[in-house]
Image (tube, rainbow, N blue to C red):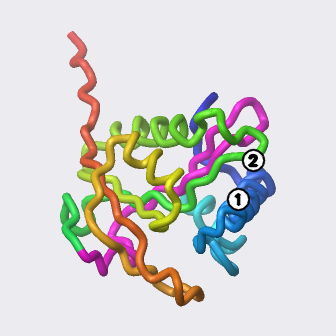
Amino acid sequence: MLLRHAEMKDLPQIEQIILDGKAHLAAQNINQWRGQYPNMDVLVHDIKNGYNFVLAEGDEILGTVSAIPGPDMSYQTLDGQWLTEEGEYIALHRVAVSANHRGQGLSTKLFNAVLDELSLNPTIKGIRVDTHQENFGMQHVIKKSGFQETGYVKVLNSSNPDQVYNIGYEKLNLPVSLPMAN
């Protein structure tokens, strides 16, 4: 398995993984990712801007996540306290794994791989993520990856009146110190 930046050729597989994720959430009666979000325009934007990472094995995409530099408008209205200041963080959005490989720990592997990648950048002070209050599977993965609950994030542009607040999490980024050459 390899974490890499997504390319436009990956878009059909990424879109299918997102659609599978929407169906999986709906089957659990979780009001997250209902309606048009995330849509093709958002996925294309993430890929073209270098935000999207994929966990791949050969030509098969196993999982997808977008790592977007702050400030993120989604995180302007936290009922709580972030660990870092505005602009010093990366926001993780649109996390999903292939339905063909569900139950194999891929969400944790995807999180660990992207956290390792982000640890190479010392300017990133924190990593933020949020999820629906009823998405217990994602909450488990987030906490297992070392994130702290920071409060409640008001969901912007939500077409679902029942989903107003997600749980916000943040993890301090601990950059890797590379050994000095002698």
Q: Is residue 179 above or below residue 101?
A: above
Residue 52, magenta (yes or no): yes
Q: Position of residue 15 (x, y in %)?
A: 75, 60
Name the residue beneath numbered marker 1.
24
Q: For residue 80, which numbered disc appears in the image?
A: none
Q: Residue reaching furthest top?
A: 182
Seen at 78% across and 42% down, the residue is 100
Magenta stretch in the rendered image: 51-79
- Report the front residue among 57 and 108: 108
User: What type is the residue that disc 1 sits on?
Assistant: His
Which quarter of the figure has residue 120?
A: top left
Q: Position of residue 28 (x, y in %)?
A: 66, 62
Please state which of the two labelled residues, at mark 1 or mark 2, is closer to the viewer. Answer: 1
- Report the front residue among 101 and 88: 101
Seen at 75% across and 47% down, the residue is 99
- Report the front residue among 121 and 167: 167
Tell whether label 2 touches label 1 (CB within 8 Å): yes
Q: CA distance from mark 1 to mark 2?
A: 8 Å
Seen at 24% across and 18% down, the residue is 179
Name the residue beneath numbered marker 2.
99
Badge 1 crowding class, 10 Å Cα cut-off, few under 14, some 14 to 19, many 20 or more, is few
Q: Which quadrant would the N terminus be assigned to in this image? A: top right
Left or right of 34 in this view: 16: right
Q: Is residue 35 above or below residue 173?
A: below
